[in-house]
Amino acid sequence: MNDAPQNVNVGIAGSITMVVLCLGVTFLCISFYRRYKRAERGDFQLGETNEGEQTPGTQGSPGSPGSTGSIDSE
């Protein structure tokens, strides 16, 4: 048996794939860090958009506690 390591030539496609993956992970890390810093300062609250409007479905949706949905409890 030949247990010697062999060279694998990934070519340009492998290099481009690695660049795209590294850029994607970097973008996601920066995005999550910015969101974390906003939440830490108190500028960001769950359920609000950047303009301060309520996102659809966060309050008053049928079945949520305290809502006046169409589900009647008898």
Image: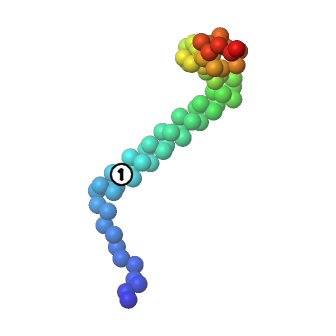
Q: Position of residue 58 (x, y in %)?
A: 60, 19
Q: Residue flagged by tag 1: what amino acid is it?
A: Thr
Query: As displayed, is residue 70 above or below residue 4?
Result: above
Q: Residue 41 is drawn in which quadrant?
A: top right
Asked if one can make out residue 48 in the rendered structure from this viewpoint, the answer is no
- The residue most toward the front is 74
Q: Residue 39 is drawn in which quadrant?
A: top right
Q: Which residue is drawn at the image coordinates 44% and 43% (left, top)?
A: 24
Disc 1: which residue: 17
Q: Is 58 left or right of 18, judged from the image as shown? A: right
Q: Position of residue 59 (x, y in %)?
A: 63, 16
Q: How many marks?
A: 1
Q: Which residue is drawn at the image coordinates 28% and 56% (left, top)?
A: 12
Q: Position of residue 3 (x, y in %)?
A: 41, 84
Q: Which residue is drawn at the image coordinates 48% and 39% (left, top)?
A: 27
Determine the secondary structure under disc 1: helix
Q: Which residue is drawn at the image coordinates 29% and 60% (left, top)?
A: 11
